Amino acid sequence: MSFKRLETDDFVVSADSVTAGLWSGNNAELTSFYTSSTQVAGSSGNYYINVYNNNSYENIQFAIAYGDVDGSGSVEFDSAVEGKSPSSTIYGQYRTLVLGDENAEFTFDGADVASPNFYVISVDRNRYKESLFPGSTTLILSSSAGEISLTDNSQVVTSVEFNDAGRVFQLVSGSAGSVSSTSPAANGYSNSGSYGWFLPDIATYILSADVLDAAASDGGIALGTVRGNNTDSENPGRLYDAIVDGASFTANSQETITSDFVFVRPRSSEFNYSENPSFISGSTGEVIYNEFINNPQVYMTTVGLYNDNSELLAVAKLSKPLLKDFTKEALVRVKLDF
């Protein structure tokens, strides 16, 4: 066995972006949606509903929640305490997560006033490794009043906005990053308005309830969000129904893989002898084959990377044995992904 110390210029670090289908099985498009009656009827169902890709209810794809700053549209925790309900909890949770300020308000692009309520689609953590891939989203929402196809505007913006949740893109009409000219124009929104936010770094979509409630002529689907009372807890189910009727939710995940390349360079005078016992006489210690004395030939099969304590850290196998003698030099590139 022979050793050679690696130098600084033998190491190169590279980062590559890898995308994959977001949903189970690396599928980019999800067309079947199921909810568990047990989960919906349970205590967690007051806050959100989990959506699965089949009726075995094994793999959660995403969750849907509804938030309202005044706690409207869901049953109060205590009738004696006004405005405190699951919807107010959801609103506060995302206000802290996204805006980082308990006094801040959600104001979506094009809105004249802050949005007091919204829907949240939160992709399950097992579906992605790092983030969602901007420009890959196509979410179709449908109701008896109309249908809309939503995507993010990441492909057309000149500068990226950031908040406490990372990058922020607007949800607009279109598909797969291709933006349509149609935009919501109701409830304080101009024609350049949006349906909400796409937050790829936390795999979350926040949709304005006001815009979705608008008529089809104003860019909405008349979703029928219940507000102004605290006796209803079905708002997440209304968005779920619109997703089921649309029957298509497409998105990709994105991951940055960092690779450490190590270049191992056996020079012509190096690594030409073998310590294999079959080369040497066990009684005299002499080389058995005289032709190997002045013209040794060996075959490299493995590269081991060691630390300064001679501890083996990694092993790289060559695709085939590599002939090495005094007339040949080699360059072996070892790639470490992490």
Image: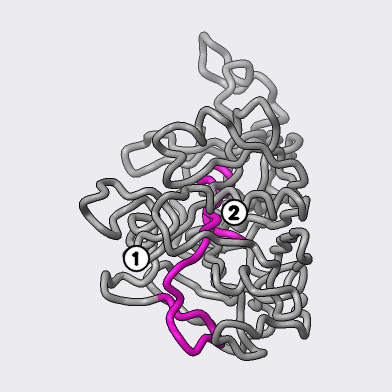
Number of callouts? 2
Residue at (43%, 43%) from the top-left corner?
A: 46
52 within the magenta span: no
The quarter of the picture where residue 52 lies is top right
Q: Residue furthest top?
A: 283
Q: Residue 50: x percent and y percent? A: 55, 41
Q: Nearer the viewer, residue 239 or 282?
A: 239
Depth check, mark 1 against mark 2: the one in front is 1
Q: Which residue is mark 2?
A: 265
Q: Residue 36: x percent and y percent? A: 58, 32
Tell whether 75 sits left or right of 257.
left
Q: Residue 273: x percent and y percent? A: 60, 34
Q: Is residue 181 above or below residue 177?
A: below
Q: Is residue 317 above or below residue 248?
A: above
Question: What range of the chain is rendered magenta?
Answer: 106-132
SS for dot 2:
loop
Residue at (69%, 26%) from the top-left corner?
A: 290
Q: Amino acid at mark 1?
A: Asp
Q: Amino acid at mark 2?
A: Arg
Tell whether 233 sits left or right of 286.
left
Q: Nearer the viewer, residue 165 or 337?
A: 165
Q: Which residue is mark 1?
A: 70
Tell whether 42 sits left or right of 274.
left
